[in-house]
Amino acid sequence: MAAFIDKAKVRVISGRGGNGCVAWRREKFVDKGGPAGGDGGCGGSVYFIADENMSTLLDFSYKSIFRAQDGENGKNKNCHGQGGKDVYLRVPVGVVIRDLKNGKIIADLDENNKIVLVAKGGRGGRGNARFATAQKRSPQFCEPGEAAVERELELELKLIADVGLLGMPNAGKSSLISIISSARPKIADYPFTTLTPNLGVVKKPDGDGFVVADIPGLIEGASDGIGLGYEFLRHIQRCRFFLHLVDSSLENPVNNYLKINEELKKYDLELLKRHQVIVLNKSDITEADKLESLKNEFKKYNSDIFVISAATKQGINELLSHIYKLVNELERHQIIVEVEHDSEFDNNDDSEYFITKLNKNTYNISGGKLKRLVAVTDIKNVQQIRRLSNIMDSMGVWTKLREMGINNDDTVIVEGVEMVYTENYF
Ligand SMILES: Nc1nc2c(ncn2[C@@H]2O[C@H](COP(=O)(O)OP(=O)(O)OP(=O)(O)O)[C@@H](O)[C@H]2O)c(=O)[nH]1
Ligand SMILES: [Mg+2]
């Protein structure tokens, strides 16, 4: 089995759009050819896709930068540049993607074949052929292609399971999963036999199946990095409920139970609120009296208690019936996607503009639409600046600025580009 890697950092970069082209038609016997510069091609995009055949993020520890192809520049004779190739990155089902810039979750790939766009390719710039109008037959300019989008992302695999097994090392978690499900994990008489999470499918009598997750045991201090299990708690975050296994043959099982709940609380308070079934295991080697008094003691914390022996299978059927019932009753926990559509995924933010007066004679103007316009404006080209200005006029920006009292020679910063206001020009 490939190494189980369940966390990775990656950098994804889309392709930039190809530049538009300035060109003229030259035909024999045709005196003045018209504009014939083609558009640039769109840059390729980067996507993630959930693939049930993948089980680890190992591939991302070898390579962490993924780049889609740039779009080709436009050419003469109205030839458009070719679009850049997209990149599809395959990850196991259950991967949650977080944007490292703001720490927000941007996608949860919780179903096979689910696809998410994480960096949209830049749009190709338009060639001069596109700008010809009745008044302006020979536009001298084209648009540059739109810039690429670059993002740093964290991938975190959170397995999709219905029931999570909790307990100290050696409590019998792997023994239980091996008798109720298809999983055959290693079972041994020493702590930390289980080193990575295992999933087992349990078939219900009505034919339906559900998934149980066995994770390495937790010990006191797990949240400070002691032992193994803490990092793996993410794999039971989606579970409907937990089976908390306790080795009843030990001296102080209640204490163990409380210690584990303390670690859960430190990891994520939500986990502590999730329903737990207390499973007192190893009844075959525990006195009946002790089992009775343990049940009474545990009742102080939680009354959903079962006594079993994974060795002799005593109590297993009763426990299974209860599990079937809970699987039907309780919902699987959703991972909340915090940013459904992030403007940085692509450059299609159409938000209105915002004007802020920075000081007596400086105004800042921002907004998604302007950002995009500025990105495709060659600021050294007078014709292009005039075009930008005309569009801003149609958006009402100049009227608004005059209302705010703008004067000649004041500075206007449009999405990072500085202009000097001249009354008659704008
Ligand atoms: N007598 C008895 N032994 C049991 C029972 N259940 C498990 N064991 C034994 O307890 C030991 C630990 O069992 P595992 O299933 O490996 O325990 P675990 O909780 O998965 O332990 P880690 O993977 O180390 O966290 C093994 O030697 C099992 O055979 C039981 O009901 N009765
Ligand atoms: Mg185990």
Image (tube, helix red, strand yellow):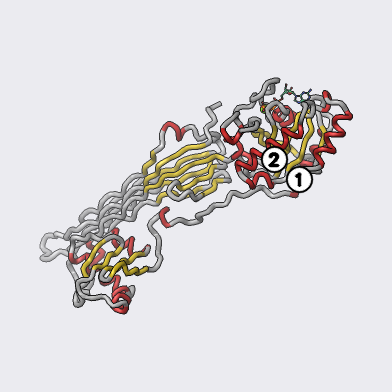
The disc labelled 1 sits on which kind of residue? Leu
Q: In the figure, is residue 35 to the left or right of 341?
A: left
Residue found at the far right of this picture: 289
- Which mark, residue 315? none
The answer to which image quadrant residue 417 occupies is bottom left
Residue at x-position 70% and y-position 26%: 170
On screen, residue 243 versus residue 47, left or right, reads right
Q: How far apart are marks 1 and 2 (CA)?
A: 9 Å
Q: Do the residues labelled 1 and 2 touch (CB within 8 Å)?
A: yes
| Vertical placement of residue 121 versus 193, above or below | below
Q: Where in the figure is residue 109, as x and y percent of width and height?
A: 54, 46
**For residue 45, above or below residue 395:** above
Left or right: where does residue 247 sit relative to residue 409? Answer: right
Q: In which quarter of the image is residue 207?
A: top right
Q: Quadrant of the N terminus?
A: top right
Q: Write down the residue under mark 1.
A: 326
Give 426 or 372, whichever is nearer the viewer. 426
First reached walking from the N terminus: tag 1 or tag 2: 2
Horizontal and vertical percent position of residue 105: 51, 49
- Answer few, some or many: residues within 10 Å of disc 2's Cα (few below 14, many 20 plus, some between 14 and 19): many
In the image, farthest residue toward the bottom: 403
Which residue, given by chain and number where applicable, does mark 2 sit on? 163
**Residue lying at 32% horizontally and 66% vertically, measured from the top left:** 365
Q: Give the image quadrant in which the ligand numbered 1 is located.
A: top right
Query: Is the shortest distance between ligand 1 and the CB of mark 1 under 8 Å?
Result: no
Give the camera-side residue of 31 and 207: 207
Q: Horizontal and vertical percent for residue 185?
A: 66, 26
